[in-house]
Amino acid sequence: GAVVSQHPSRVICKSGTSVKIECRSLDFQATTMFWYRQFPKQSLMLMATSNEGSKATYEQGVEKDKFLINHASLTLSTLTVTSAHPEDSSFYICSAHLLGGETQYFGPGTRLLVL
Amino acid sequence: GDSVTQMEGPVTLSEEAFLTINCTYTATGYPSLFWYVQYPGEGLQLLLKATKADDKGSNKGFEATYRKETTSFHLEKGSVQVSDSAVYFCALNTRGYSTLTFGKGTMLLVSP
């Protein structure tokens, strides 16, 4: 089946630093990737939709200058949390949409803790 | 707008018990419906899906039927195992074929 990886799986950083999270589709091409944020015991909140070669589309209330998304190739999208603060601590999950299909395939998630 | 409502958890069952997790939805058009499962500390895995009314999705002993008349997609399993303990998310696609709207998730705890 389609596999999506994320790196790192867990990161701890100091307040004010920037953190980059990578999302890769390992065995398929994904023209569209999605970034979600999940708070404890809550559902996934869509942050942005990332299309290869174009600017990401952000959901209402998500700061595009805070959460920088780059989708440089059909297999890689990155999310950079700039100037991270403790309130940015969360579980970030990406998913990739299989070209020509309907299903999204999810990465294992990245747990970010900002001290 | 489109939305998904799931029963609140946790659902606590003994091994081999029958499972039902209710899911209802509101949507414009004709969405596809999905169940995803999230094991502790992991991302989401697609469990099953149905793309049109009366379709039944099934996988690993779980099944759900797309009921347009009741706008429901309840998840069922005849005999749960301890390894089924996880959070289950009902979802539908919306705003085109690729964007998902999720329910809040239902935690299932199965004891030996």
Image: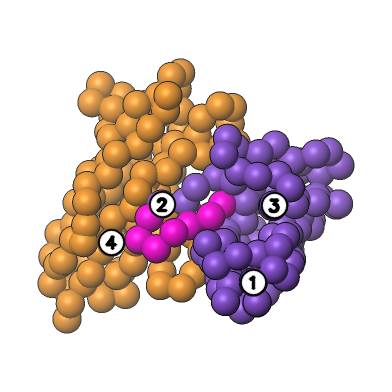
Q: CA distance from mark 3 to mark 2?
A: 21 Å
Parent chain of label 1: A
| Residue A80 location, quadrant | bottom right
- Chain depicted in orange: B
Residue A49: image location, x then y, percent: 67, 41
Q: Earlier in the sequence, mark 2 or mark 1?
A: 1
- Decide: is A32 above or below A7: above
Q: Earlier in the sequence, mark 3 or mark 2?
A: 2
Instruction: Say what secondary structure mark 3 lies in.
Output: loop
CB under 8 Å between discs 2 and 1:
no
Q: Which mark is residue B107?
A: 4
From the image, tell me which residue sits under label 2: A43
Closer to the camera in the image, B3 or A85: A85
- Residue range in magenta is A36-42
From the image, tell me which residue sits under label 3: A66
Q: Amino acid at mark 2?
A: Ser
| Residue B65 location, quadrant | top left
Instruction: Say what secondary structure mark 2 lies in.
Output: loop
